[in-house]
Image (spheres, rainbow, N blue to C red):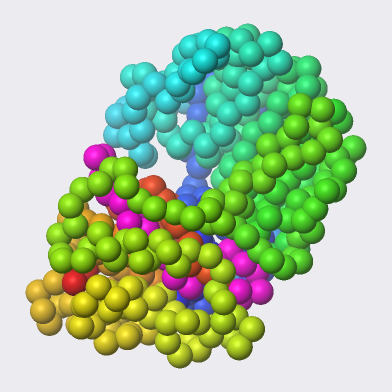
Amino acid sequence: MRRVRRQHGPAIANREPTPCTLGVTRENRGPPYPWLDDDGSVSYDRSAVRRCGRVCWVWRTARGVRARQRALHITLTAVVCGAIALAGASPRRPAPHLTPAAYVGFSGTGVAAYGDAPSLGGFAGITLAAPAVAMASTPSGNGYWVAGADGGVFAFGDAAFQGSMGGTSLFAPVVGMAATPDGKGYWLVAADGGVFAFGDAAFHGSAANQNIGTSVTGIAPTSNGYWLVAATAGVLTFGDAVSYGPSPNVPPFPPTAAIAATPDGKGYWLLQPDSIPTSFRVPDPPANFPGGRSAVGIAASQIGPDPDTGQGAYCNPYGPCEQWCALFATWVWNQVGVAIPRYAFVGDVYNWAGARGLVLSPGSTPAPGDGVLYGTGPQSASTSPHMAVVAEVWPDGAITTVDGDSGPEPDGQDAVTFNGPFLPADSSSYNDMPIYAFVRP
């Protein structure tokens, strides 16, 4: 069953969800949470908010809002954005105390230095309101900024805090960050293509009003502009940025996780993790059923585009031409001797396992080769929209998975992809779908 997958945030193009597109991704995390400024309050950069006020009407409403929500959303956005644009800043208000129970308990320093990179600080003893998702360094190499998914920005070393979107109601979470060449400003980009400029960073436009059919995953700077990269590898140019390809919405669509610019700003690299032959060895806990580890290797060997797409909608190598995440998982298990029928409906996998005492609760610790079932229960395609094969289980409980019938290809050209790591308890925010069971065949 098809879903838009992890790296890459909610889809930009308007489309109603089907049973396999109910899950968007980790980036659709729901309402943002306040972020602390240096003085313990939540505030905004005035010049940036003025710039955002001029464009937020377009990028907040032009994409991603279903028809039945559009009228209310437009009205509320007009009022809020108009007020921000006129005032130039929001009222300052006390920030809530961040305790270890706040939202997600991310712990540790968070920033590790190697080679001649100085260690300038991190997040030891701090529980963030939203995960740190991006960073950028100053030209001197003696400072850096770290951005959170909610738009909060933390400055270390000689990096100057120029403002953030912390405390602002973002329509999509932040996924990338880039600094200006002189280090006196920075941009944040959200999964829906919205761009936020701070300090001396100039706003050159965004992808929020461009129909690229998927989400944005990164940003890279030029001397007076920037590139945005889409989850399907398309690169969009703004300011003086030059396009070197690939073009959005032009096949093939290799899932793309990040973009990095050359030092002279005249080229870039794209990271396409699903185009790399993948194995899962670290960590390496034992599988809890015979063939579990072999099942992971077989699943990983399939990562890549669906070779049968040209034969028709949802055609795939694992069964009939229909939504095929369960077909893929049961095919994998068949290859290691598990006598399960080749089911297309995830709920049937649950019922098969339940009749044999093979269902684990969502709070259980899975093992490599197990199945992970998303949704709220096995009753229907809408309550049981997707499943995957567990590839890794990390010491903190985080898992990675191999998913059949997964995106983010915009034209129904779905693939077998790699997802994670994420904590199963956080699946609702990471995948936009909770986990309702694991299956150990």
Residue 219 in view (yes/no): no
* Total numbered labels placed on residues in the image: 0
Using residue 36 as the reference point, say whether residue 291 is left or right of it. Answer: left
**Vertical arrangement, residue 185 with respect to residue 212, above or below:** above
In the rendered structure, the answer to whether residue 288 lies left or right of residue 24 reads left
Placement of 423 over or under 178, stated as above or below: below
Q: Nearer the viewer, residue 162 or 158?
A: 158
Q: Which residues are magenta?
A: 391-413
Residue 11: name its quadrant. bottom right
Q: Please state the horizontal and vertical placement of residue 41, each as a whole percent of the image.
A: 52, 21
Vertical placement of residue 399 versus 403, above or below: above
Hey, which residue is sitting farthest right in the picture? 240
Image quadrant in which the C terminus is located: bottom left
Tell me where residue 53 appears, x and y as whole percent: 77, 40
| Residue 327 or residue 337, whichever sits in front | 337
Residue 436, image quadrant: bottom left
Residue lying at 24% horizontally and 40% vertically, measured from the top left: 395
Q: Nearer the viewer, residue 105 or 285?
A: 285
Q: Is residue 401 magenta?
A: yes
The residue drawn where x is 45% and y is 90% is 320
Q: Is residue 234 visible?
A: yes
| Residue located 22% across and 63% down the image | 292
The quadrant of the rendering that contains the N terminus is bottom left
Image location (x, y in percent) of residue 399: 32, 51
Q: Is residue 240 left or right of residue 340?
A: right
Residue 104, magenta (yes or no): no
Q: Is residue 320 above or below residue 139?
A: below
